[in-house]
Amino acid sequence: MKITITASVEQVETILAVKELLEREGHEVYIPASTQKMINGELDQEKFSRMKELQGDSFYRQQLDASPIKKHWELIRHSDAIYVINVTKK
């Protein structure tokens, strides 16, 4: 099954843990582009979160190749299911 994980950028560790669990069960798992960039070391999570808090979504959008919402929507469209991680932030 193809599953897209949807969560806040502040939940990188949780997203990664859920992704690994689902992959061990044989699923193909998609994650948000910003999360993947953090895992790859292309974005620093703490700096990213601070700058997003200070500058809002404009900073967030500049850090990604395309609109994060459109990009994520495409992942969802090609999935069989979504997995929403809705953890209280701060």
Image (cartoon, rainbow, N blue to C red):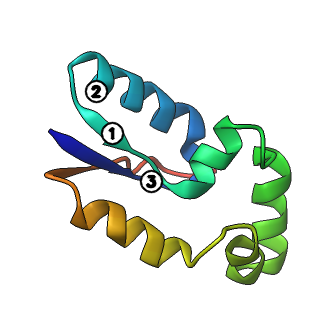
* Mark 1 surroundings within 10 Å by alpha-carbon count, few (fewer than 14), some (14 through 19), many (20 or more): many
Type of the residue with mark 3: Ala
Residue 7: mark in rendering = 3
Q: Quadrant of the N terminus?
A: top left
Residue drawn at point x = 82 percent, y = 79 percent:
55
Is 87 or 5 nearer to us in this picture? 5
Q: Which circle's residue, 2 or 1, is located before the other in the chain?
A: 2
Which residue position is annotated with label 2? Answer: 22
Give the secondary structure at mark 2: helix
Q: Nearer the viewer, mark 2 or mark 1?
A: 1
Q: Where does the image place residue 27, in percent across and percent down from the top left?
A: 22, 30
Q: Which circle's residue, 3 or 1, is located before the other in the chain?
A: 3
Is 74 or 15 nearer to us in this picture? 74
Residues under labels 3 and 1: Cα distance?
13 Å
Give the secondary structure at mark 1: strand
- Kindly tell me whether residue 2 is visible in this rendering: yes
Q: Quadrant of residue 57?
A: bottom right
Classify 45 as above or below 68: above
Residue 20: mark in rendering = none
Residue drawn at point x = 73 percent, y = 83 percent:
58
* Mark 2 surroundings within 10 Å by alpha-carbon count, few (fewer than 14), some (14 through 19), many (20 or more): some
* Mark 3 surroundings within 10 Å by alpha-carbon count, few (fewer than 14), some (14 through 19), many (20 or more): some
Residue drawn at point x = 58 percent, y = 40 percent:
12
Residues under labels 2 and 3: Cα distance?
15 Å
Which residue position is annotated with label 1? Answer: 29
Q: Nearer the viewer, mark 2 or mark 3?
A: 2
